[in-house]
Amino acid sequence: MKACFMGLGYIGLPTAIIAAKHGIQVIGVDINPEVVDKTNNGCLHFIEPGLEDMLKEVVRDGVFHAALKPEHSDAFFIVVPTPFCGNHEPDISYVEAATRTVIPFLEEGNLFVIESTSPVGTTDKMAKIIFDERPELKGKIKIAYCPERVLPGNVIYELVHNDRVIGGMDEASVKIASDFYRIFVQGELHPTNCKTAELCKLTENSSRDSQIAFANELSIICDKADINVWELIKLANKHPRVNILQPGCGVGGHCIAIDPYFIATEFPAESKMISTAREVNNYKSFWCAEKTINAILEFEISHKRKPVVAMMGLAFKPDIDDLRESPAKYIVTKVIQKFNNADILIVEPNLKEHKIFKLSDYREAYCRADIVVFLTAHSVFKTLSWRDDKVILDFCGIFRKK
């Protein structure tokens, strides 16, 4: 079998590599020549533990290669981003562009699968586009929607062991798609239709967003009430049916921070709690920025000088280099805009450099700073010791102190 993966990002590339490791001949397609070149040289363009060694292996063995254009294959997988527009309307233009790119290569008996997180009805829209251009393929190819469910930093394990939802346009499409995923997925495969599978992905991330919003709202309440939120949650979770998540400085990433909008914009009257959760998590980032700004102003008043400020973390979650929709990046930007001449040290240990921010070593920044703002709970930050001589704003629970 030969499979073509459209998109070599945080999900497309790992899935392509795992498929190649399990005996499938794979071509990975990306519009970025630099990504294609690095991939063919066995180098990842992002951090994912253990994945680069697997990439080198499948490239060396000749079962995987990257290219700028697709090739005739047995199965085509659309694994491209689905961002939203400025008004939070979902943008499926990348999915449509990838679909149109593979249409000339589709043949009778092919499997076409969308993995990209998508609004309800996207698979049907892409099927219409395919059959409008290639009417002779109607009833001759299988079409399905199968969303990913992986956690950055643990992608290799979860791609293999997590359950998958297989939404097909018909029973035959579900069967053929399931046959493909069974090659490398050890988790259970759950059959359904395309629309249910699309909404299932959005539902999973909206649920997480709502749970995080509860924890973030608690943290704001605790700050006003002078209560340690970390201790509060620990005690509340002693209840056998309570499992409150940990608060942070907001919600980021390409899934949880975006997917709820795909529901809220399509069903605005019905999605009141989902919309409110988004508002709470966005407000938490604004609140953290304001707390930091106020701490700087208070320091200037009490010490008669400008402080050195260390902003610790840019990634949206611990121990990765992914900055997509990162609340930490938003907070850093807001603080810099307010104090553009201040001595602000920006730390992100998982990046060697950033095109906008000058990065500092985390130990040096912690040592020099008068005010330390922990935004992302990277493991290396937890090796630092609490310093009473510093103003510490711990928004992600490094020390679990007030």
Image (tube, helix red, strand yellow):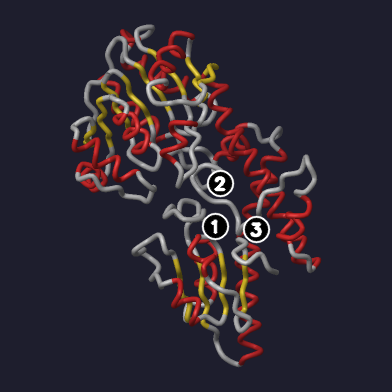
Q: What element carries label 3?
A: helix
Residue drawn 26% across the image and 22% down it: 2
Q: Position of residue 81 (x, y in %)?
A: 42, 39
| Looking at the image, residue 231 lies above or below residue 154 | below
- Which residue is more in the foreground, 381 or 288? 381
Residue drawn 43% across the image and 40% down it: 155
Answer yes or no: is residue 104 visible: no
Q: Is mark 1 on a helix, strand or loop?
A: helix
Dots 3 and 1: beta carbons under 8 Å? yes
- Which residue is more in the foreground, 150 or 106? 150
Q: Residue 327 carries which label?
A: 1
Separation of marks 2 and 3 at Cα, in angstroms: 13 Å
- Which residue is more in the foreground, 164 or 97? 164
Q: Position of residue 188 (x, y in %)?
A: 52, 22
Q: What residue type is labelled 2?
A: Ala
| Looking at the image, residue 236 lies above or below residue 3 | below
Separation of marks 3 and 1 at Cα, in angstroms: 9 Å
Q: Position of residue 204 (x, y in %)?
A: 60, 34
Left or right: residue 115 versus residue 377 is left
Q: Position of residue 124 (x, y in %)?
A: 47, 19
Residue drawn 57% across the image and 78% down it: 371
Mark 1 is surrounded, within 10 Å at the Cα level, by few (under 14), some (14 to 19) or many (20 or more) other residues, namely many
Residue named by callout 2: 257
Q: Which amino acid does label 1 sit on?
A: Pro
Q: What element carries label 2?
A: loop
